[in-house]
Image (tube, grey):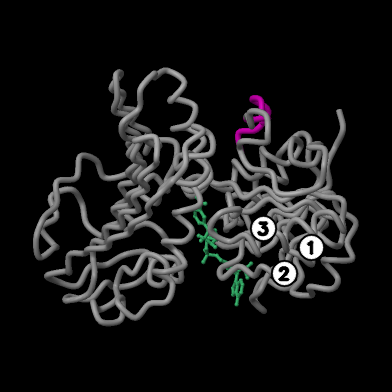
Amino acid sequence: MKKYRVIEWATGVVGSAALKRIIEHPQLELAGVKVYSDEKDGRDAGELVGLPATGVAATKDVDAILATDADCVIYCPMPWSLDEMCRILESGKHVITPCPYWFPYKQNPEVAAQIGKACRAGGVNLHASGCNPGGIAERFPLTFTGWCNRIDRITITEYGDCRDYESEPVIREVMNLGKTPQAAKGNPVQAILANSWYEPLDMIAEGLGCEIIDYQSSNDYILANQDIETAAGIIEKGTIALNRNRHVARTREGTEIIEEQIWFMDDLEQNRLESKLDIPRDSGWRIRIEGDVNLIFDVQVDADTQKERTTQGIQTTGFHCVNAVPLVCESPDPGIKTYLDLELIAGRMGTHSER
Ligand SMILES: NC(=O)c1ccc[n+]([C@@H]2O[C@H](COP(=O)([O-])OP(=O)(O)OC[C@H]3O[C@@H](n4cnc5c(N)ncnc54)[C@H](OP(=O)(O)O)[C@@H]3O)[C@@H](O)[C@H]2O)c1
C-alpha cells in the first residue's frame, strides 16, 4: 500500500482532530507539524493530541516546514492566508483545507487563477473540504438531487448549540456570538462569510447545470438575557447569543438554493435568550429538497461517540480532510479539485484503532 507523507498545519480544534487521524491512518505518515504558539513549539506531535510520541516535533518555523519532504499539507489555521496556501503549493505539496476556497471560480476568479498558477508551479492540487462548507453544503445535497426530477428549492440548514466549541476566534469573529449588535454590524468577516457561502451555492448550481441570476444574504440575531458560560468564554448579557445567516441564490432555471446557519449559545428551551426561534434540533443539519419529490435528510453526530456533538462535528471536518489525502494526491492535472472533480472520498481507517 502506498503511503503519503503529510504535514499538519495548525493544531486548533480542527487541526488537532486531523493530526490524530494522520498519526493513526494506515495510509499516512506524519512528516511535520506547524504550530503558532510558543507553548507548542518543539513538542512531540503525539503529545499535543494525547497519543504516544511520534518522533516528529512541532515547529513554528514556516521555512523549515516548507522545506520538509511531504506529499500533502492539511492546512487548518485561523485566520488562513491565500499567499501562504500558494507558497505551500509552489513548494510541491498538495493542500487540503477546511478553509476557503471550496469553489472560487465565480465569486473570486482572481483567487482561483492565483491558486491555479501555484498548483501548476508545484505540480499539485488544492482541495477545500470539511463539514459545512465542504460536505453538507454542497456534496451531500447534490448527491440527493439524483433522486429528483423537477427541483424547486434546496435548503441546507445548520443548527448548532455551540457552547462546547472552544475556538474563540471562530465563535466571536466568524460566528458573531458574544458581539454587541453594533460590533457585529461593523464586523468585516460578515462580508467574507457571505462570499464563502456563495461558493457552495455556485457549486450546487454548477452540479445541477443551472445559472445563478441573483444572490441575497440576510442576517438576524437574538441577544442573551443573562451571562452564558461556554467553552469560548462568557457570552455576556445583551450580546448576540443566537446568530442566523441566510444566503439565497435564484437560478434562471427556477431552482432556488438556500444555505442557512443558526448558531446559538443555549439549549433548545432558549430560556437564556431574549426571544425564541423555532429550532427542531440542538445540533446537526437538515437538507431539504422540494420539487416533484420532497425529501428531508437530517444529519446528526451521535453524542455518545463524539464529545463535540454540539460543535458541528468539528472533528469530522478534520477527519474528512485526512481521508481525502490519497485521492487528492493522485488526482491528475494540477489545480483546484472540488467535489465535482474528485471521486467519492470514503473513510480508510478500518477497525484497527480504538485510540
Ligand atoms: N469547512 C468546515 O466545515 C469548517 C469547520 C470548522 C472550522 N473551519 C475552519 O477551519 C479553521 C480552523 O478552525 P478551528 O476550529 O480549528 O480554529 P481554532 O481552534 O481557533 O484553531 C486555529 C489555529 O490557528 C493557529 N493560529 C494561531 N494564531 C494564528 C495566526 N495569527 N494566524 C494563523 N493561524 C493562527 C493556532 O494553531 P496552534 O494551536 O497550532 O498554535 C490555532 O490553534 C478555521 O479557519 C475555520 O474557519 C472550517
- Badge 2: few (under 14), some or many (20 or more) residues near its Cα, within 10 Å? few
Looking at the image, residue 246 sits to the left or right of residue 190; the answer is left
Q: Where is residue 109 in the image (x, y as percent from the top left)?
A: 62, 59
Q: Mark 2 points at which residue?
A: 84
Q: SS for tag 2? A: helix
Residue 67, quarter of picture: bottom right
Which SS does the magenta portion mostly show? loop
Q: In this view, does 242 lie above or below 350?
A: below
Q: In this view, does 134 lie above or below 43?
A: above
Q: Is residue 349 magenta?
A: yes
Residue mark closest to the camera, 3 vs 2: 3
Assess whether mark 2 and mark 3 are in contact (beta carbons under 8 angstroms). Answer: no
Q: Name the residue under label 3.
A: 112
Name which residue lies at 87% across and 56% down: 122
> In 3D space, how far apart are the residues under numbered discs 2 and 1 (Cα atoms)?
6 Å
In the image, is the residue at mark 2 within 8 Å of ligand 1 by its beta carbon? no
Assess whether mark 1 and mark 2 are in contact (beta carbons under 8 angstroms). Answer: yes
Q: Quadrant of ligand 1?
A: bottom right
Question: Foreground: 206 or 182?
Answer: 206
Q: Mark 1 points at which residue?
A: 88
Earlier residue among tags 3 and 2: 2
The amino acid marked with disc number 3 is Ala
Q: What stretch is highlighted in magenta?
A: 347-355
Earlier residue among tags 1 and 3: 1
Q: Where is residue 106 in the image (x, y as percent from the top left)?
A: 56, 54
Quadrant holding the C terminus: top right
Looking at the image, residue 268 sits to the left or right of residue 114; the answer is left
The amino acid marked with disc number 2 is Glu
